Each structure stands twice: as C-alpha cells, then as structure tokens.
Amino acid sequence: MADHLSECILVQVLKRLPVKPLFRCTAVEKSWYRLIKSPYFKTLYSSYHQKNDKNKYLLFYAHNPPRFSLRHDDEQSKEYSPQLQFPIQEKRLQVYGISNGLICLSTRLDIQDLRKSIYLWNPVIRKSKTLPDSPLPSRDQLLQIRYCCSTAGLAFGYFANMDDYRVVLFVTYHSLEGDDSRPDLFYVYVYSLTTNSWKTIDNLSEVPCYKISSSVVIDGSVYWLGEYCNLIAIVCFEVENEIIRNLNL
C-alpha cells in the first residue's frame, strides 16, 4: 500500500494523526521513518495541530504525593485525565519547558541539582530520558577558586533551524572575596538531544540578572526573566549564534 501512495498524499494523511498512531507509523518502512523524522514534517505536523486541535490541556503537578495530571483548558470543564506516571521517582519536580509534547523537568531543590537531575519526558508514548551530567562545577570545585553559584536559569525548546531539542542552562558565578576585585562570571551550558552531549560557552559579556523566575523560547532564542538592582531584567541568548545580551526595557 505504501508503494502506491505518493509522498504528497502520505504527508497529508500522516500530519493529521495523533502522536501514538504516528509513532507506530515509523515502523512501517524506512521511507516513512525518514519522512516522519525529517525537519520538514516535524514543522508541518506541529503547525497543523496547533491550528486545528480543539482539545487543549493544562499540565498540573501536585507535590504531595508527587503526581501529574491533565485538565481541559476550559473553565466549564472539571474533567481530569488519569494520573500521568513519571517513571523516575523524584520529589519536588519542576517543569522548565514543554515543546511538541516533550517535557523538561528537574528537581531544583538546589542549584547543584542541575548537575545531575534533568529529565526529558514524553507522557504520550511513556518514554523518558535522564540527561547526562551537566558541566556545572560542584560546590567544592567552586570553593577552591573562591566562587559560588549565585543564580541559574533553565530553559528548553525545539530549535527548527538546527532541527534539535536543546536544554539551555544560564549560570552566574559570584566571587566570595567580598569586594569588586574579581568580576562575576557568566556561563551558558547547552545540551543537544541529537548528540546527547553538553557544550560549555564561556567568555560571555556581562549580563547582570538575578532571581531568575521563568523562561521562554521564541524564534531560536531563549529569554529569561529576572531582577537586577530591584528592576526587571531580561536576558536573551541566541542559541545558534551563541550570543547573550540584556534587553533594555
């Protein structure tokens, strides 16, 4: 049957499928797998369902006991989905980003947790992945050079121009010497799902931003909202160009 379907017709059929049936279609034959995994189809599929899916859901997380659930994004609806079982037993999980149904989570009890406890999870197909340890230095390593990790922001998204999901960790290190003789250090650590590896980006320009509260990914850049000197601060990191800057408000 697949031999008689033109690719154009096949694309129109596949893009309308829910995630589970689409995932099963990758096993039909190699040409289907290549098509479904292509950047062109991923963009087409995401765009189609964002425009046409009427069933919008909100993701809820309860801490005690730890559990996830979905609820219709409708004020008149009180219907909840069955609980979503996150396969890794962690307490105090926090969601840092959702892209095309893929969820990025971390425990975030402490900045040091971002060294080891970062996860990607697709609840629809019930698959999860623990990321390799990030290059974030340990507390002991920082004490040896008399620095501490003063703030950190985590972001996650799909970057179409690179056809890759990235986890981006922005960290500020502050001197423990108690004076201005040693400047703050600014680092960005980027995880690529394609290569399953981290990259450290240092020697960045000064981007004062503390008390980071949230992030968003738009058009290939990550934006973090924070504070500096009691004023709102926004940091922008261009992932492909590896450029970081503050936005003037």
Image: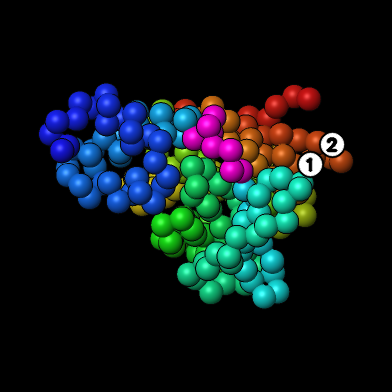
Q: Residues within 10 Å of mark 1 (few under 14, many from 20)?
A: some
Q: Which residue ends up furthest to the right in the rendered image?
A: 230
Which colour assignment does the render follow? rainbow
Residue 213 placement, left or right of 140: right
Identified by mark 1, the residue type is Glu
Give the numbered dot on residue 227.
1
Write the residue at 67% across / 75% down. 65
Check the image and report above or below for 103 versus 207.
below
Residue 149 visible in this rendered orientation of the protein? no
Report the span colored magenta.
Answer: 49-56
Separation of residues labelled 2 and 1 (CA atoms): 5 Å
Quadrant assignment for the N terminus: top left
Write the residue at 78% across / 25% down. 249
Image marks 2 and 1: residues in contact by CB distance under 8 Å: yes
Write the residue at 54% across / 29% down. 51
Residue 74 visible in this rendered orientation of the protein? yes
* Residue highlighted by disc 2: 231
Total labels: the figure holds 2
